[in-house]
Image (cartoon, rainbow, N blue to C red):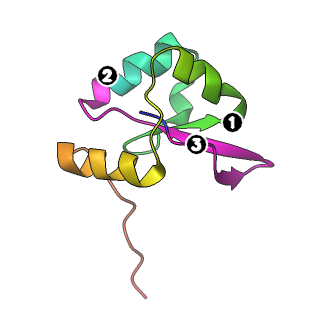
Amino acid sequence: MIDPPAVPRWGRLWSHLASDTSYDEAHAFAAAHGIPARGWDRDHYDVPDEAYAAMVAAGAVPVSSRELVAALRAAGLRRPKARSRG
């Protein structure tokens, strides 16, 4: 799954690429399509906007950000950032 590029960071927009099956599936798909391991962020890969179309063409299913998070939660694969205390 991949959501639309909407998160601004470092002068560009980013998508989130994830699997609702397993982390291994996400890692294999990312590696096979040139997404570097440093893009992994707990439960998804951060993908620059210019790679979005290529990820969809390679088989990533376009979903909304809400759908992506809901699918990760339903699969037990969501790893949210820890909330800061204070």
Residue 25 is labelled as 2
- The Cα–Cα distance between marks 1 and 3, rounded to whole angstroms, is 8 Å
- The Cα–Cα distance between marks 1 and 2, rounded to whole angstroms, is 21 Å
**Could you say which quadrant of the image residue 46 lies in?**
top right
In this view, the mark in front (1 or 3): 3
Relative to 15, residue 50 above or below: above
Element on which disc 2 rests: helix
Asked whether 16 falls inside the magenta stretch, the response is: yes
Residue 35 location (% of width, % of height): 56, 23
Q: Which of 85 and 57 is in front in this view?
A: 57
* Amino acid bearing label 1: Asp
Residue 17 location (% of width, % of height): 47, 35
| Residue drawn at point x = 55 percent, y = 33 percent | 38
Element on which disc 1 rests: helix
Q: Dot 1 corresponds to which residue?
A: 49
Q: How crowded is mark 1: few (under 14 residues within 10 Å), some or many (20 or more)?
A: some
* Amino acid bearing label 3: Pro
Pointers 3 and 2 in contact (C-beta within 8 Å): no
Q: Quadrant of the N terminus?
A: top left
- The Cα–Cα distance between marks 3 and 2, rounded to whole angstroms, is 20 Å
Residue 4 is labelled as 3
Q: Which of marks 1 and 3 is nearer the N terminus?
A: 3
Residue 66 is labelled as none
Element on which disc 3 rests: loop
Relative to 61, residue 41 above or below: below
Q: Which of marks 1 and 2 is nearer the N terminus?
A: 2
Residue 55 location (% of width, % of height): 55, 22
Q: Report the span colored magenta.
A: 3-24
In this view, the mark in front (1 or 2): 1
Asked whether 76 falls inside the magenta stretch, the response is: no
* Amino acid bearing label 2: Glu
Q: Which of marks 3 and 2 is nearer the N terminus?
A: 3
